[in-house]
Image (cartoon, rainbow, N blue to C red):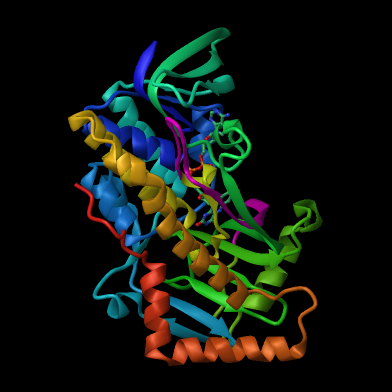
Amino acid sequence: MHTQVGIIGAGPAGLLLGHLLHLEGIDSVIVENRSRDYVIERVRAGVLEQGTVDLMIRMGVGERLRREGLPHQGLYFSFAGRRHHINLAELTGGKTITVYGQNEVVRDLIDARTATGRPLHFEVGHVTIHDMDSERSKIRFEHNGREEEITCDFIAGCDGFHGICRPSIPEGSIKHYEREYPFGWLGILAEAAPSSEELVYTYHHRGFALFSMRSPKITRLYFQVPPEEDIANWSDDAIWDEMLQRLTTRDGWQPAIGPIVQKGVTPMRSFVAEPMRYGRLFLAGDSAHIVPPTGAKGLNLAATDVMVLASGLAEYYAGRSTRLLDDYSDICLRRVWKAQRFSWWMTQTLHRFPGESEFDYRRQLADLDYITGSRAAMTSLAENYIGLPLDIQLA
Ligand SMILES: Cc1cc2nc3c(=O)[nH]c(=O)nc-3n(C[C@H](O)[C@H](O)[C@H](O)COP(=O)(O)OP(=O)(O)OC[C@H]3O[C@@H](n4cnc5c(N)ncnc54)[C@H](O)[C@@H]3O)c2cc1C
């Protein structure tokens, strides 16, 4: 079997890329090692930047997003018992973010892929890639008990942080930059109507907490815990108790409580692989970079990567020009590093670090007081949060 672009991974990056290529008339095969249901039900990110929403609408996969997504004009920073509103739209000339679960994005993209009739194989095993520096790169895998091989003009490594693409690159051809954080996030989904229409980022003496939502009936909440925290140590009552201690403000605002339908602990890491290309293998999304979720950037970065990659591949197939493909890594990394900077900044501004003194706590409160009191500081936060533009214009 031969295809123009072999895509490994059916997360947001792989599925968006597959559909963008379809719109350009470019063949692809997507292989995914998990089942369809597992991929659709995996609860992860939920905040889409304006650019990601615009992309999905332009691609013709934004109908449900437009109908069911929750557009937010702003967000709150909460500290010392008070919530402070930051009006993102007013500070950025009308741009907004939209709350729409990553699993809904993935569901829409799988439906769109299925409708094209182009191949999308779930539950493949033992995926390996070969000859990435040749014009006939290969993907091998097992499917329905058979060994398969696909030759490809290009391979897109969209297989997330723990995938096989990045580790298949010969050592020394790629450099890794990494930072681990001394905490993770305990996250829950609760069947409770959100008590705030907008997200509330909270800095508390006991640690960070975030109030968010997935729909008018589902609240999504997180708080900072040690990185190795075992979720089994947290009963639902203990989770609500901690949540309420951190999130409740002096005016009596607090999240509505309801049955917890999902809970887990996610470690936090910053990671960048440079360059995002080796020969004919292009890394996109989490396979190339990870951000702590505080800035809500992971899914949005994946979308931007594949937008650039799809344009580069379209340019290549239209006129055999490799100009944009050659610049792919540099174009993406410039934006990735700015998102890394912002995600790191949000994380260190809103979390408590082990060994911090009372001086550090008061200094961080002053930082937040400055941010929420200065239009210049709020504008900087707002333009980063709604998503920085790409430095180049794509066709
Ligand atoms: C546990 C977790 C929680 C998160 N929570 C948040 C959050 O709350 N807020 C936020 O903004 N961001 C969050 N993120 C980040 C965000 O979800 C990611 O940035 C986003 O999923 C990136 O999309 P992707 O397509 O690049 O990677 P992924 O979504 O990871 O997709 C990669 C796909 O490749 C598949 N795959 C892996 N290995 C192979 C293989 N060998 N062969 C074939 N397929 C393979 C995987 O099953 C997966 O479907 C979270 C990430 C994780 C891991």
Characterize the magenta stretch by its predominant secondary structure: strand
User: Which residue is at a point 27% across and 50% down the rendered structure image?
Assistant: 55
User: Which residue is at a point 30% across and 23% down the rendered structure image?
Assistant: 27
Q: Position of residue 123 (x, y in %)?
A: 54, 22
Which residue occupies the foreground of this view, 250 or 266? 266
Which residue occupies the foreground of this view, 24 or 312? 312
Q: Is residue 349 magenta?
A: no
User: Where does the N terminus fall, quadrant-wise?
Assistant: top left
Q: Position of residue 159 (x, y in %)?
A: 52, 36
User: Which residue is at a point 63% across and 55% down the rendered structure image?
Assistant: 178
Q: Is residue 62 visible?
A: yes
Q: Is residue 269 magenta?
A: yes
Count of marks overlaid on the render: 0
User: Which residue is at a point 38% across and 87% down the rendered structure image?
Assistant: 376
**Image side of residue 59 versus residue 156, left or right:** left
Q: Position of residue 176 (x, y in %)?
A: 60, 49
Looking at the rendering, the stretch of residues picked out in magenta corresponds to 258-284
Is residue 111 depicted above or below 230 in this figure?
Answer: above
Q: Position of residue 183 (x, y in %)?
A: 71, 64
Which residue occupies the foreground of this view, 149 or 167? 167
Q: Is residue 67 visible?
A: no
